[in-house]
């Protein structure tokens, strides 16, 4: 990946899960821990639990409901936030993400966390990982009522945070979200090559990808 044109970037918008934090926690929770607890709660097999859950997950993917812990607690009749706490020890920064955040701060960039995560999930992660001191804002798409996949999110963000799309960098591990940001006019876009440390690197298709955060710091500051 070529060095970023940092002199042309004033604002850095960062996703949380899979970008600053290792996606292993979320993948483990939704694909392993929650199906197991759902099976135990409803007295069914693990295989049956997955048969019931996976179509629901597919139905809500990309919608605000997919990211809403209140929705899933009601839908599944389970205390989802409490279940997340059971595996909270898996919440972890991606390697050198804190070094990158410190470099952005040192270079005087405006930095906002923009996540589709529900506020309860965001709060749980902030208990485990210190992110807030490096950030000007921590924004959940639930604040606006639209996920990042929706153009209305970006309009609300611009009205709230006042950034110039042509002078902004956005990093996210979701290709649909990156495409939404591109439609809105954000000029500098990066995907994440390996959002989950326990899984293989992924194809980021038309997007250049972050391989490591130290490489991104080149020319910064």
Image (cartoon, rainbow, N blue to C red):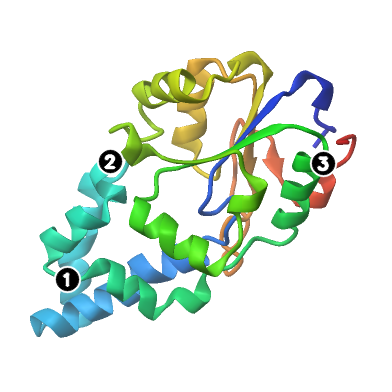
* Foreground tag (3 vs 2): 3
Q: Is residue 55 visible?
A: no
Mark 3 neighbour density, 10 Å: few (under 14) some (14–19) many (20 or more): few
Seen at 70% across and 45% down, the residue is 210
Seen at 50% across and 67% down, the residue is 127
Dot 3 or dot 1: first in sequence order is: 1
* Foreground tag (3 vs 1): 3
Give the distance between the C-alpha atoms of the residues marked 3 and 2, in whole angstroms.
34 Å
Residue 150: give x, y in percent of width and height: 35, 27
Q: Is residue 128 above or below residue 164?
A: below
Give the label on residue 64, or none.
2
Dot 3 or dot 2: first in sequence order is: 2
Residue 212: give x, y in percent of width and height: 76, 52
Say whether residue 77 is left or right of residue 135.
Answer: left
Residue contact between numbered discs 3 and 2, judged by CB atoms under 8 Å:
no
Residue 102: give x, y in percent of width and height: 77, 49
Mark 2 neighbour density, 10 Å: few (under 14) some (14–19) many (20 or more): many
Relative to the observer, which residue lies in front, 176 or 129?
Answer: 129
Q: Dot 3 corresponds to which residue?
A: 106
Residue contact between numbered discs 3 and 1, judged by CB atoms under 8 Å:
no
Say whether residue 195 is left or right of residue 35.
Answer: right
Q: Dot 1 corresponds to which residue?
A: 78
Dot 2 or dot 1: first in sequence order is: 2
The quadrant holding residue 163 is top right
Give the label on residue 90, or none.
none
Q: Quadrant of the C terminus?
A: top right
Seen at 80% across and 45% down, the residue is 103
Mark 1 neighbour density, 10 Å: few (under 14) some (14–19) many (20 or more): some
Residue 11: give x, y in percent of width and height: 66, 27
Which structural element holds mark 3?
A: helix
């Amino acid at each position: 990946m070529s060095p970023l044109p940092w002199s042309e970037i004033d604002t850095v918008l960062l996703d949380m899960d899979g970008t600053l934090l290792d996606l292993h926690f979320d993948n483990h929770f939704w694909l392993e821990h929650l199906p197991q607890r759902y099976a135990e709660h409803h007295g069914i097999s693990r295989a049956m639990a997955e048969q019931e859950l996976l179509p629901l997950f597919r139905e809500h993917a990309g919608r605000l409901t997919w990211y809403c812990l209140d929705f899933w607690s009601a839908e599944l009749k389970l205390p989802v936030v409490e279940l997340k706490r059971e595996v909270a020890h898996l919440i972890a920064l991606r390697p050198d993400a804190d070094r990158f955040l410190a470099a952005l701060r040192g270079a005087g960039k405006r930095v906002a966390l923009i996540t589709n995560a529900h506020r309860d999930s965001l709060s749980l992660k902030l208990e485990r990982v210190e992110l807030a001191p490096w950030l000007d804002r921590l924004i959940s798409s639930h604040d606006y009522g639209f996920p990042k996949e929706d153009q209305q999110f970006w309009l609300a963000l611009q009205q709230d945070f006042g950034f110039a799309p042509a002078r902004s960098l956005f990093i996210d591990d979701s290709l649909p979200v990156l495409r939404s940001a591109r439609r809105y006019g954000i000029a500098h876009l990066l995907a994440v090559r390996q959002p989950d440390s326990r899984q293989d690197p992924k194809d980021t298709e038309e997007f250049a990808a972050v391989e490591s955060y130290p490489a991104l710091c080149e020319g910064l500051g």
